[in-house]
Amino acid sequence: MLVRQLIFSAAAIEGVGPITETLKWGQPAYLTEISKSGTTIRLGSNADTGSYAVYFHCQTTLLASFREMYSDVFRYEGNRAIVFDISDHIPENELMVCLTMALCYHRDKVARSSTRYQ
């Protein structure tokens, strides 16, 4: 529930518009459906291992950026997820930065590419 709250807080701070909360593959997913400013964030758990993950689109550069910024803060699963054990303390400030980057991924990608041509 804390991660969900952080997603909505990041969206409000960044002004990306309403977040659509839905299910994808039976897991909670959060989309910037109206503004299309970001990429989907999905939450999943593994009852067998007592872990849960925040999933990001695997064809983005998000996880590479997160690793560069927070290599010693999070555990990662490939190019798609930040993984937590159920007993982990969530580094809220760092996770908020990651969520914000995901919610603004397309908007920021367009802004980055337009500055290349100026």
Image (cartoon, rainbow, N blue to C red):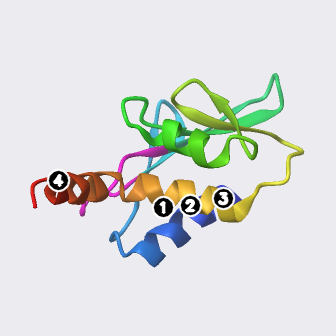
Tell which circle, 3 or 4, labels the residue nearer the N-terminal end.
3
Instruction: Give the residue type at disc 2.
Output: Val
Q: Which residue is mark 4?
A: 116
Disc assigned to residue 94? 3
Disc 4 residue type? Arg
Which quarter shows the C terminus?
A: bottom left
The stretch in magenta equals 31-41
Q: Secondary structure at mark 1?
A: helix
Quarter-of-image position of residue 115: bottom left
Distance (Cα) linking label 4 and label 2: 24 Å
65 relative to 16 in the view: left or right: right
Residues at marks 1 and 4 touching, judged by CB atoms closer than 8 Å = no
Left or right: 114, with 22 as reference point:
left
Mark 3 Cα shell of 10 Å, populated few (<14), some (14-19), many (≥20): some
Looking at marks 1 and 3 on the same chain, the residue that comes earlier in the sequence is marked by 3
| Drawn side of residue 74 relative to residue 44, left or right | right
Assess whether mark 3 and mark 2 are in contact (beta carbons under 8 angstroms). yes
Q: Nearer the viewer, mark 3 or mark 4?
A: 4
Residue 33 in view: no
Horizontal side of 74 relative to 16 (left or right) equals: right
Distance Cα–Cα, label 2 vs label 3? 5 Å
Q: Which residue is mark 2?
A: 97
Q: Position of residue 75 (x, y in %)?
A: 72, 35
Residue at 48% x, 61% y: name it.
100
Residue contact at pointers 3 and 4, CB within 8 angstroms = no
How many other residues sit within 10 Å of disc 2, few (<14), some (14-19) or many (≥20)? some
The residue singled out by tag 1 in the image is 100
